[in-house]
Amino acid sequence: MSGLVGCQPQAPASTTAATTTEQHATAQPVPGKAMDEGKARMTAMNGVLLVFAGETGTDWQAYDDVAGVQWRDAQAVEMPEVSDPDVRFSRSGRLTLAGFGETDLPDGETGADASLRRGNEGESGVTLNGNAQRVNEVAIVKFYPSEDYETILRNQLLAAAKIVLEAECPADDEDSQKNRFYRIDLDGETFAHVEAYVDQEPGPGSTTFVFTRSKPERRIAELSCREAPQP
């Protein structure tokens, strides 16, 4: 999907990837724990989404003070190589997803200098994508493929949020991205739509969430995904 390069965690050289995956302690999200904490505190992802879904969510600078987000870019940066004008501008930073524990992570170096460091598996890149005037989507990428998308989302959102599967894509082989599309409802209204998928490469792989304000019908059709029955 265009405009996500800036959000992808920097992967180490392939020689380090195998070691990283082998040493990775599976720190899968724990359903109850983080959500209970979420009733009393705001997670960084939920803070970003509250702005995104709000009246000022199209404004690039409206995200300046979201708690738990460290912005690398002070403002939107144009990416001339992106063909889609709706996501030609981006603003990148970092946040930590709730519900994960400590594990081995790439240190950000490449080639012979690549190594590992200890850190929280929830450490993620966050990128706002849009045009010069408005933010149109939010992408969040963490290291390691984690296919339990609903649990990850649940650990970030308020207890009142409802996560509804909208479409599921065919997974024909091990290299499949396992794409799924969800709608997030809050107080009886649509809060956001999200596409979730995994990548096995580069490096240790990754998990990506792309949030939009409307259902990505074209994307679902392009991937030949199956619409899910709605409650």
Image (spheres, rainbow, N blue to C red):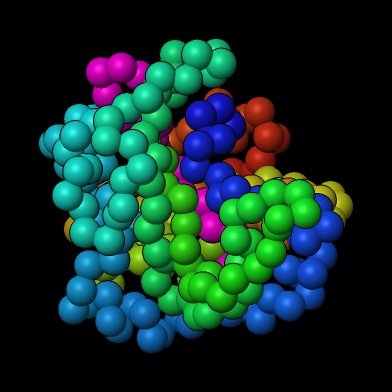
113 is higher (above) or lower (below) than 4 = below
Is there any visible trace of residue 155 in the rendered image?
yes
The residue at the point 31 percent across, 46 percent down is: 71
Q: Nearer the viewer, residue 65 or 176?
A: 65
82 is higher (above) or lower (below) than 186 = above
The location of residue 130, given as percent across then percent down, is 37, 25
Identify the image quadrant of the C terminus: bottom left
Work out which residue is located at the far left of the displayed protein and give it: 55
The location of residue 90, given as percent across then percent down, is 40, 29
208 is higher (above) or lower (below) than 56 = below
Whether residue 60 sits left or right of residue 33 in the image: it is left
Whether residue 29 sits left or right of residue 104 in the image: it is left
The location of residue 105, given as percent across then percent down, is 61, 67
124 is higher (above) or lower (below) than 59 = below
Q: Nearer the viewer, residue 218 or 116?
A: 116
The residue at the point 22 percent across, 67 percent down is: 42
Work out which residue is located at the far front of the displayed protein and give it: 113
The residue at the point 26 percent across, 42 percent down is: 52
Q: Is residue 145 magenta?
A: yes
Q: Nearer the viewer, residue 166 or 33?
A: 33
Start and end of the magenta stretch?
129-148
Q: Nearer the viewer, residue 137 or 79?
A: 79
Is there any visible trace of residue 84 in the rendered image?
no
Query: Which of the 4 image quadrants contains residue 73?
Result: top left
Q: Is residue 156 magenta?
A: no
The residue at the point 22 percent across, 43 percent down is: 63
Count the marks: 0
The location of residue 74, given as percent across then percent down, is 27, 35
Identify the image quadrant of the N terminus: top right
